[in-house]
Image: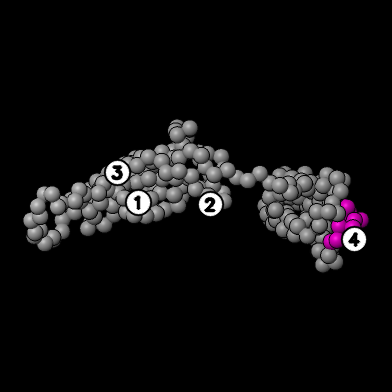
Amino acid sequence: MPGGPYPTTRAKFNDYIQLVCPYLNANAARLQISGANLTAVNTLKPLWDALWAKYIDPDKKTKTVVKNTDTMIKQWKTLLSSIYKDIPQSVLTEQDRVVLGLKLRDPHPTRVAVPEGAPTISIDKMMHLKHILKITDPANPHTQAKPKGVRETEIQIAVSDEGVPKTVPVPVPVPAEQTPAPAPFPQESDWHTLVHTGKFLYTAHFTDAQLKATAYYRARYLNTRGETGDWGNTVNGVVS
C-alpha cells in the first residue's frame, strides 16, 4: 500500500502525519493496533517533527535535510501501511476511513475480462539474423498502448526449415497415387512461445544455421490474471 492514501507533496504529508498520529493513539485499542506498532509511531513522530522544523526553515534547509525528509517519508509509509493492513475491516468506521484516507475494499471486485480483441503483429524491420517485431492494438494502431486490462503479449514463432541447406537421403520413387499431400505449414504443433512481453517492439534472433528459413509469428493478449485472448494475424519473413 505504500502508494495508497498518502499525500504526494511533502507539506501535505506533514499535515497528514500531524492528523493521523494522535488519531491512532486515541483509537489504538479499538483499531487493534499492536503495542510495537504504536511505539514505532510515537518514536518516529518527534524525529519527524525535528526534521520538518529544519525543512521549513530557509536557513537550515539543506540538500541533506531534503534527502533525510524523503527517506523518513518512506519509513512512515512502510510503517503506516503495515498498521492499516492489520486493522480489521469490520472495526473501521466512516470517520476512520476519512481521517486515515482508507477506501472501502470492494467485497465483490469486478473480475478482469478476458481480452476480447487480438493484437496485430508485423515485422517492422528485417536485419541480418534478426526480425524486429511490432505489436499494436488494432483499435489504437498509432499508439504504443495496450487495451485496458491487458498485462502483456505472448508472441509465438514457428520456423520452417524450407530453404535451409542440409543433407538429405536420395528419395525412393513413390507412385503419385501413394504420395500424401504435404500438410500446410505451420501446424499447431509447430508453434512455440517466443516471449511474453509488455513492450510493443521485440527483436527475434536467429543462428547462421537458420539462414534462408522462414519464420512465422502470431500473438495474443494476456490480462492481469494471465488469461489469454484469441490469436491475431500471422506474418512471416525469411531469415537473411
**Among numbered discs 3 and 1, the one appearing first in the sequence:** 1
The x, y position of residue 167, in whole percent, is 13, 61
Per the rendered image, the range of residues in magenta is 22-33
Q: Which amino acid does the dot numbered 1 rest on?
A: Glu
The x, y position of residue 113, in whole percent, is 58, 43
The prevailing secondary structure element of the residues shown in magenta is helix
| Residue denoted by label 2 | 226
The answer to which of 57 and 82 lies nearer the viewer is 82
Q: Which mark is residue 29?
A: 4
Q: Which amino acid does the dot numbered 3 rest on?
A: Asn
Q: Residue at 68%, 46% (x, y): give it.
A: 109
User: Would residue 164 appear left or right of 147 to someone viewing this image?
Assistant: left
Q: Which amino acid does the dot numbered 2 rest on?
A: Gly
Q: Callout 2: 10 Å neighbours few (<14), some, many (20+)?
A: few
The x, y position of residue 3, in whole percent, is 68, 50
At mark 1, the secondary structure is helix
At mark 4, the secondary structure is helix
Q: Residue at 86%, 54% (x, y): give it.
A: 91
Q: CA distance from mark 4 to mark 1?
A: 62 Å
The answer to which of 97 and 177 lies nearer the viewer is 177
Q: Which amino acid does the dot numbered 4 rest on?
A: Ala
Q: Which mark is residue 236?
A: 3
User: Would residue 125 appear left or right of 224 to someone viewing this image?
Assistant: left
The answer to which of 132 and 115 lies nearer the viewer is 115
Q: Which mark is residue 164?
A: none
The answer to which of 211 and 182 lies nearer the viewer is 182
